[in-house]
Amino acid sequence: FLPSRLIDVGLRDGSEEPRLLVGPQGDIEYLTLSHCWGKTPFIRTLQRSLYSFQVGIPWNDLKLIFQEAISITRRLGHKYLWIDSLCIVQDDPEDLQVECSKMADIYRNSYLAIAASASRDGSLGCFLPETYNPPLLELGIARSQETSTGYHLGFRTSIEGFEAVVDAGTLNSRGWTLQERLLSPRILYCAPGQKHWECLEHRRSQTRSTADTKVRYRELRTGKCDSGIALHLSWYELIRGSAGYSGRTLTNQNNKLPALSSLAYNFARRTRNKYATSLWERNLVVGLLWFVAKKRGVQSLGFWSILDLSEC
């Protein structure tokens, strides 16, 4: 599988402008960018710019987050990058519908996702400026009594770890980015102070040498579980859990189902089960075992759907 369009990032030295590649073919590895759009205007592919972008995308017109994602792709030795706002024609409803239906395959088949964890919009870039972390205590230590040459040992406050930066980060609060996180085989999180890594087996931070193997929702990402019921319970935890979909925000509430559809499609393919508005045919009873203590909002998806709650 390959996306309909990719960004050819050009040569590693930056001597070439990036350009839009339509209909890529062959054995190609590509990266993706997971980011918050924010409210700051930025360059997008429109019908009028589709052909000119195939010649070149002006570097100075790209917002900082796109420039840094392209630079990271180049430095990692890769040539192709997928960015939603540039690889989907944003003012073409048909193209939007077709390409959004491919999201599961786009992220699932990518080599790596670059995630701008703390950036609330593209003007801030992937790497926010680091805050100075002065030593709490600094000691001068001599090597021996015969020489005055020694070294200084400083103690600083700890840098925020994976949970604070990634799980509680700005990017992780958005509805659309849940599928990007769970479908991507590998993710490089860019954050102030350090970088973080997540794959199907490990979560690791730059300043910590030990790996955290408790990968969230691993069963849903791999489809491997001892029990079919347990697998589907993981799905419902994903929907209504404290760190799941319902706690995330959507600019347009009409996207409540589309923003989850790629995850549902991928899960249905792995379990060979039929999906309908957050319910699963073979586990219908489990899916209906819920209630609300108080009426909230206006029903729009159907009274049976756990997604039909106003805070989601």
Image (spheres, rainbow, N blue to C red):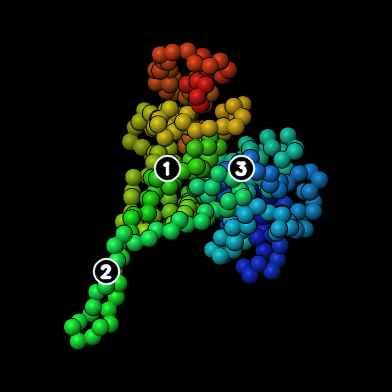
Query: Does 77 sit above or below residue 199?
Result: below
Q: CA distance from mark 1 to mark 2?
A: 35 Å
Label 1: which secondary element: helix
Query: What's the mark number on residue 37?
Result: 3
- Which residue bears the numbered disc 1? 167
Q: Quick check: marks 1 and 3 in contact, CB under 8 Å?
A: no
Mark 1 vs mark 2, foreground winner is 2
* Residue displayed at 23% across by 80% down: 143
* Residue displayed at 43% across by 21% down: 287
Residue 77, image x, y percentages: 56, 65
Q: Earlier in the sequence, mark 1 or mark 2?
A: 2
Q: Is residue 81 left or right of residue 180?
A: right
What amino acid is at disc 2?
A: Leu
What amino acid is at disc 1?
A: Asp
Mark 3 vs mark 2, foreground winner is 2
Q: CA distance from mark 3 to mark 2?
A: 45 Å
Q: Earlier in the sequence, mark 1 or mark 3?
A: 3
The answer to whether residue 193 is visible is yes
What amino acid is at disc 3?
A: Trp
Residue 302, image x, y percentages: 54, 16
Query: What's the mark number on residue 139?
Result: 2
Query: Does 282 sit above or below residue 53?
Result: above
Disc 2 crowd rating (10 Å Cα; few below 14, some 14-19, many 20+) is few
Residue 111, image x, y percentages: 53, 54
Q: Nearer the viewer, residue 86 or 141?
A: 141
Q: Nearer the viewer, residue 56 or 283?
A: 56
Residue 289 placement: quadrant: top left
